[in-house]
Amino acid sequence: MNANPPQTPPGKSGFDLSPPSAQQRQALEADLSAEERRVLLNHGTEAAFCGGLLDNKEAGVYVCRLCGLPLFSAEAKFNSGTGWPSFTGPFAEGHLAWIADRSYGMERTEIRCGRCGSHQGHVFPDGPAPSRLRFCINSVSLQFVPKSQPLPDPLGRGDKL
Ligand SMILES: [Zn+2]
């Protein structure tokens, strides 16, 4: 696995990347559906070709379903044919956390939200040029925000694009 995290320190995008308080986390988690809890909090994977964002081609950003941090821009989305929304790179450095995952006897790199730590999917070194990375992400882990609309701000941070 050659998928190494970016070397620049987090927080350069201007977004407040400090984690939610225990109280905020509790409130956000209470708002999740059973399927969202399974994927975001318990590292589940949604069924291929079933995710609601798989074929979305609108301009905008994909934010963390739990904390609202932008994780991917629509320009980075591509059709990988795998059945999961796929991206060539993160919205900004520090917005994703890269974790070695040796579950199921495989060497993979798990992707979590860089702010709240919720599970997003995995990154593989077989994507298109120039990054050669394929971020394979669950639709339920994300919320799509069309270009003309404001970002959700469940943590009250006031971050803007
Ligand atoms: Zn998050």
Image (cartoon, rainbow, N blue to C red):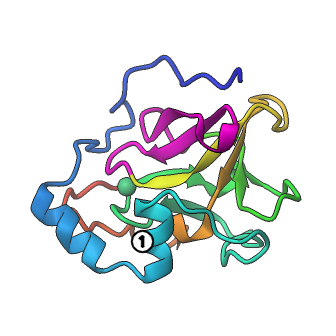
Residue at the front extreme of this rendering: 105
Where is residue 31 shown, x and y percent of the image?
Answer: 30, 80
Q: Is residue 159 above or below residue 53?
A: above
Q: Is residue 8 above or below residue 120?
A: above
Question: 9 and 45: which one is in front?
Answer: 45
Quadrant where the image shows the N terminus: top right
Question: 147 and 9: which one is in front?
Answer: 9
> If the picture is divided into quarters, which one holds ligand 1?
bottom left
Q: Which residue is mark 1?
A: 37
Q: Is residue 15 visible?
A: yes
| Residue 89 among magenta residues | no
Q: In this picture, which residue range is highlighted in magenta?
A: 91-117
Where is residue 53 shown, x and y percent of the image?
Answer: 67, 72
Q: Is residue 55 above or below residue 97?
A: below
Residue 27: image quadrant is bottom left
Residue in the image at 42% along x and 71% along y: 37
Residue 128: image quadrant is top right
Q: Is residue 149 visible?
A: no
Where is residue 90 shown, x and y percent of the image?
Answer: 57, 41
Residue in the image at 60% along x and 22% along y: 4
